[in-house]
Image (tube, grey):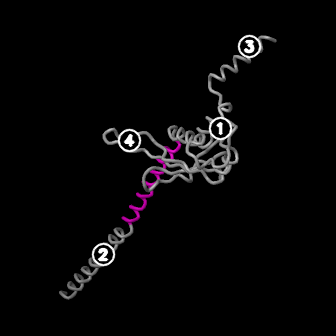
Amino acid sequence: MVRMMDDRVASARKRRRKSYFALSLVIILFVMVGIPCGVYFHIQWRDRIFRQEMVQVVHSQEVGELIKKGLEEWDPHAFDGKGVINTYRIDDSSIRENPMGGVDFDAIVNDEKKFDVSFHVDRYFIGDDGYGPIKSDGADPSTELTDALEKRYGKGWSETDNAAEKYRKEHPQEFPTPQKKRANNNRADNNDEWF
């Protein structure tokens, strides 16, 4: 009878050891698989939130004004129908974080993929005042767009700084000021009175 009791106790101990072993194995698997998976999904979630913030910044009115200003520096007749650049749209698939800070993205001109301009924008930290306004750190047009601008405005167009401003000064008749527009409108009104 004592021997039977010893066998029962020994088998109970073996079962407990097996259950402890199985429980230990489950815990080790959870630690080795579960935690890295959790970290991975957390990083993916954080990256998705960060990407959404970058897209919001790039599509903001402030960045839109910087894009227009940058394109107008390249083409003096930008957005008036007389120049090479008439419209632009931001290529969302090109929005990416710059390792040195800021955001890089491409603007596609006139809905032609070959006419793209790469932009870099950044917002700098100003100490106690927090962050300053968004600034453009430059734009780089594609070679096809540069060729089209040179064809329209002359050779060496892309090699000079402030080329659009120089063109405006050299060809003032193409860029009427508000005073010239009013004077032309008044002349037209006066001519109508004579008839």
**Residue 86, position in %: x, y?**
66, 40
Q: Nearer the viewer, mark 4 or mark 1?
A: 1
Please report contact status of discs 4 and 2: CB closer than 8 Å, yes or no: no
Q: Which residue is mark 1?
A: 77
Disc 4 to disc 1, how far (Cα)?
34 Å
Q: CA distance from mark 2 to mark 1?
A: 80 Å
CA–CA distance between discs 4 and 3?
54 Å
Badge 1 marks a residue whose secondary structure is loop
Amino acid residing under circle 2: Ser
Q: CA distance from mark 1 to mark 3?
A: 30 Å
Residue 100: quadrant of the picture: bottom left
Quarter holding the N terminus is bottom left
| Magenta extent | 34-59
The one of 24 and 159 positioned closer to us in this rendering: 159
Amino acid type of the residue that numbered disc 3 sits on in the rendered structure: Asn
* Callout 3: SS: helix
Q: Residues within 10 Å of mark 4 (few under 14, many from 20)?
A: few
Going from the N terminus, do you reach mark 2 or mark 3 first? 2
Q: Could you give the CA–CA distance between mark 4 and mark 2, rounded to whole angstroms?
A: 58 Å
Residue 34: x and y in percent read 38, 66
Q: Amino acid at mark 1?
A: His
Badge 3 crowding class, 10 Å Cα cut-off, few under 14, some 14 to 19, many 20 or more, is few
Residue type highlighted by circle 4: Tyr
Disc 4 target residue? 131
Of labels 1 and 3, earlier in sequence is: 1
> Is 70 on the left-hand or right-hand side of 14?
right
Name the front one of labels 4 and 2. Answer: 4
Extreme residue in the bottom direction: 3
What residue lies at 79% left-to-right and 11% top-to-bottom?
Answer: 194
State the mark number for residue 19: 2
